[in-house]
Image (tube, rainbow, N blue to C red):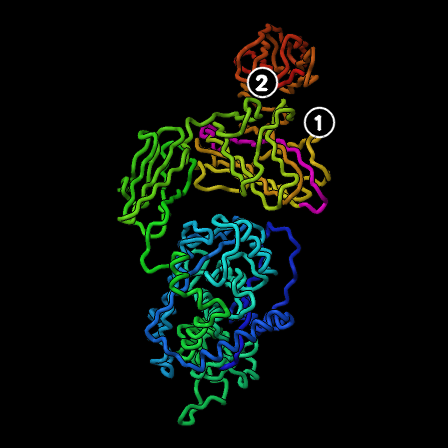
Amino acid sequence: MKLYSLFLLFFGALSLFSTVHAQKQQRILDPQNMREGENVEYCLTHKKHTALLHNPEYLTGLAITEEEEAAIAKKGENQKATIYTIPVVFHVLHFGGIENISDEQILNALAILNRDYRKQNADTANVHPDFQGMPADIEIEFKLATIAPNGQCFNGITRTFSPMSYQGDDGGDQVDAIVAGNNIFNGQWPGNKYLNIFICGDIGGAAGYTYKPSNWGATTMKNGIWILHDYVGAIGTGGVGSSRALTHEVGHWLNLDHTWGGNNNPGNTSSCSTDDNVQDTPSCIGVTACLLNANTCSTDNNYWGFDIRDNVENYMDYSYCSKMFTEGQRTRMRNALQVSSTGRANVVSAANLLAVGATSTPYLCKADFNADKTTICLGDEVQFQDESYNAVVGWNWTITPSTGWTFTNGTSATSPNPSISFDTPGMYDVQLTATDGTNNDIENKSGFIRVLGTPASLPFWEGFESYTSLDNLPNWALLNTPLNNSFVIESNFGYSGTKCARLNNFGQAPSNIDELTSTNIDLSGIDPTTGSVTLSFRYAYRKRTSSDYEYLKVFITGNCGENWAQRKTLGGNQLSNQVSATAWEPASQSDWVTIHMTNVTSNYFSETFRMRFKFEGEGGNNFFLDDINLYAGAPSNDLVLASLTNNQFTDLNLYPNPTDGDLHVEFSAQVGGAAQLQLTDLSGKVIFNYPVQVQSGANLIITDAHQLASGSYLVVLKMNGASFTKPFVVK
């Protein structure tokens, strides 16, 4: 059909990411605008266009562009031998979820674009007989740009971590988040130099949208395409049924309308009187399924007077079987690339292609690599992935130290994606030298692989007392996304001693993820049939405002991190219902909460058990963590620091704690007899050793701590091969 308008295309998805706690707008969907079997509106083009008509600047810019377009169309198509190249940048806006799609999925989407616009898709041979011979090669190709606006080389993909991925009611806000926070260049990516494609988790209840070519906003990033992650490509989160959405979107970006013209609802009979300004697309009202024999308008008779079927298989219809553009659409799109006022002509100019690195001859821009995991246990394999861009023919990998590891699965130092097994604990540097045959580049990552050593044994206790810093800890790995405040050591207080782990969350921007992940711990000695394990910890936290909703999540793994299972979630008022409008920290033990987890099941009784504490901040208040205690048996409010034999001692209590003089040691014993009471430092070095006579039942021992310097210590009570240990503090 032929209506001279495409303005803002909008595809839709309903669900918002559950961990984004912004107010979600209630969206009312139009069933007429949904493809069969879907629960999203497929396109909102003209509703968005109607809103733009209230913008005087848009109207002025549109008039300028339409005048230039008319002049070019009047000249006719004379570019038959020209293959246009459009430089593309994919901007992934994600919040750490499935919307952070892989490079492979993006490259798959790019391949589909090139296939469809060059008529290389095999299904063009299967169009309805009425349209045999009509599918057109548009002679437009798409290449990833490799030079950012500041001259930095990159692989054509940027990534931005932000909750705006799921707050898509204003696409401009999403672009602003990308401008400010992407990992390549923080600034404008001009729309007259790049085709910017924004991949998000939500775009206001749609699956994708773009703007009609116009003088309005021609040089800005907002002259781009928004699309949902699951409408990108046919792999990963995408699928074959949604993989042509980007083909459809680019058609709109190149000035095509829907085949039925000037309204946003397929199936509306009034569309027979509208037009898409393309002569060889029959009049129709549009379909929402693959209705190949649809013939919905009687106003499009051919030369012989026969009524023409609808071109249901056109990319600009709503069917699931789209597979073609027509020659008329080809002309209209190629004309759009000759219009200067929209910036489209500059996008495909030879000078711009050179400037943005989208030339026909690819070259090595930068060596880079990644790995499927960077912290492993002894004997585990790491799969490395070459991510050099954009033309690589040779690789050379160097691992330092040069011993303690072996190439596996038939790979070698010259493989593009080697697999390496590590059998010696420590930190390993990894270096890749890549070449395109002429140019070489080296990427070196220090301490990239961490191989854990001998597993820690039960009971495992972490009070952070022996650390001055959380950097390069032997027992803990940190994650800080984005790079802002992370977990640090608090040296002035804790629950059981004078230290704890502290996260300065107060005053941070929303959307922070911070993690503490433990070393490997040996649970293999626990009987899987009769045994049990408890994971206990203490935390202190206040909200900043009553509406804050932040999370603490606890994960466990039994295979050193190959798979993680979420076993505890504390969020919102469950984490704390108390509010402090200023930066808060605990003042007494009553400010701390003790958690006991008994769901460490026998599936995780291995020597490669690990645990992870994940805090998801939304600009609330500070968070504190202490006394992480993993031990066999039922929950205990006392720290379990050594295995007990026959439950010899129970109810061990120290007071006052902290102390500046006498220390009272109170406990119960099953049997009486000779015992030893030791005061040790945190490493276990004995400072004082007192022989004592224990009686059956309740006992109270008073010992002098005056001679101890200020700091943290342990009381160790030993008798008949059993021992009980508890920390205390001297002021």
Q: Amino acid at mark 1?
A: Ser
Provide the secondary structure element on which disc 2 rests. strand
Q: Residues within 10 Å of mark 2 (few under 14, many from 20)?
A: many
Q: Range of the magenta residues? A: 521-548
- Apparent side of residue 531 relative to residue 84 in the rendered image (left or right): right
Point out the frontmost of discs 1 and 2: 1
- Which residue is found at the position 52% from the left and 17% from the top? 683
Residue 468 in picture, x, y percent from top left: 55, 24
Labels 1 and 2: the sequence-earlier one = 1
Query: Residue 252, position in %: x, y?
Result: 49, 71
Query: Which label belongs to residue 673?
Result: none
Q: Is residue 531 magenta?
A: yes
Residue 42 seen in this snapshot: no
| Circle 1/circle 2 CB separation < 8 Å | no
Position of 629 compared to 453: left or right? right
The residue that mark 2 highlights is: 725
Rendered image: mark on residue 588: 1
Q: Nearer the viewer, residue 722 or 450?
A: 450
Residue 588, image quadrant: top right
Residue 274 in sight here:
yes
Q: Amino acid at mark 2?
A: Thr
- The C terminus lies in which quarter of the figure? top right
Q: CA distance from mark 1 to mark 2?
A: 22 Å
Residue 260 in picture, x, y percent from top left: 51, 80
